[in-house]
């Protein structure tokens, strides 16, 4: 009897915690992927002195009241001289539940920094796999500090908002 009461209390506490969950990953998936090696096989015959350019974009869409899709897009372009060796683009997405109790500023940080931090290892692995399958040398993208990127983005937005406000005539 005492065991049953303890189990009931434990189950009730677990349900309470689930109801109070402020953040939850529903799904992580590849939304779009593209790999091009437009100058192959000629690029394989050149001396390999690549120049790598990595572009990143984070976007989000509100699906329901507390449900957001966040998409991290990585575009990796590798050139050898004037020729493009490969162009790889991966849109890694996730569906996340973010409770109403989360303050607006914290919600923006969660969507703009925390969710991309979760998605990045998946996107990085997809890029590495595609580059490897193109028979190019192994590519391991360096980790990204999304908190710093988000903070910089917010500073730029605040600076732009400050410039847009009309100045009072003296």
Image: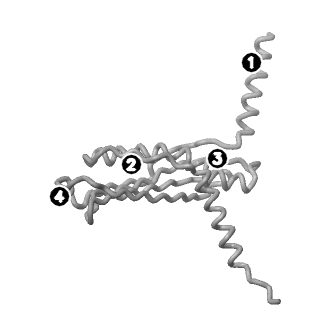
Query: Residue 28 at x, y = what percent?
Result: 51, 44
* Mark 2 nearby-residue class (10 Å; few <14, some 14–19, many ≥20): many
Residue ranking furthest to the top:
1
Type of colouring? one colour
Q: Which residue is mark 2?
A: 127
Query: Residue 8 at x, y = what percent?
Result: 76, 21
Name which residue lies at 46% across and 44% down. Answer: 122
Q: Earlier in the sequence, mark 4 or mark 3?
A: 4
Image position of 43 with respect to 167: above or below: above
Q: Which residue is mark 3?
A: 97
Query: Residue 106 at x, y = what percent?
Result: 71, 52
Camera-nearest label, 2 or 1: 2
Query: Dividing the image into 4 quarters, which one contains the N terminus?
Result: top right
Q: Which residue is mark 4?
A: 42
Camera-nearest label, 4 or 1: 4
Name which residue lies at 68% across and 77% down. Answer: 163
Quarter of image, res 162: bottom right
């Amino acid at each position: 009897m005492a065991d049953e009461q303890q189990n009931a209390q434990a189950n009730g506490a677990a349900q309470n915690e689930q109801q109070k969950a402020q953040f939850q990953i529903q799904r992580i998936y590849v939304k779009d992927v593209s790999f091009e090696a437009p100058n192959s096989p000629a690029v394989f015959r050149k001396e390999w002195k690549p120049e790598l350019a990595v572009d990143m974009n984070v976007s989000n869409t509100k699906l329901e009241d507390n449900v957001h899709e966040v998409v991290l897009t990585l575009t990796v372009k590798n050139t050898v001289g004037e020729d493009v060796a490969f162009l790889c683009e991966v849109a890694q997405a996730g569906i996340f539940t973010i409770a109403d109790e989360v303050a607006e500023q914290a919600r923006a940080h969660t969507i703009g920094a925390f969710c991309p931090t979760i998605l990045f290892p998946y996107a990085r692995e997809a890029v590495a796999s595609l580059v490897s399958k193109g028979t190019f040398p192994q590519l391991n993208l360096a980790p990204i500090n999304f908190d710093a990127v988000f903070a910089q983005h917010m500073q730029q937005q605040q600076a732009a908002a400050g410039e847009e406000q009309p100045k009072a005539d003296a």
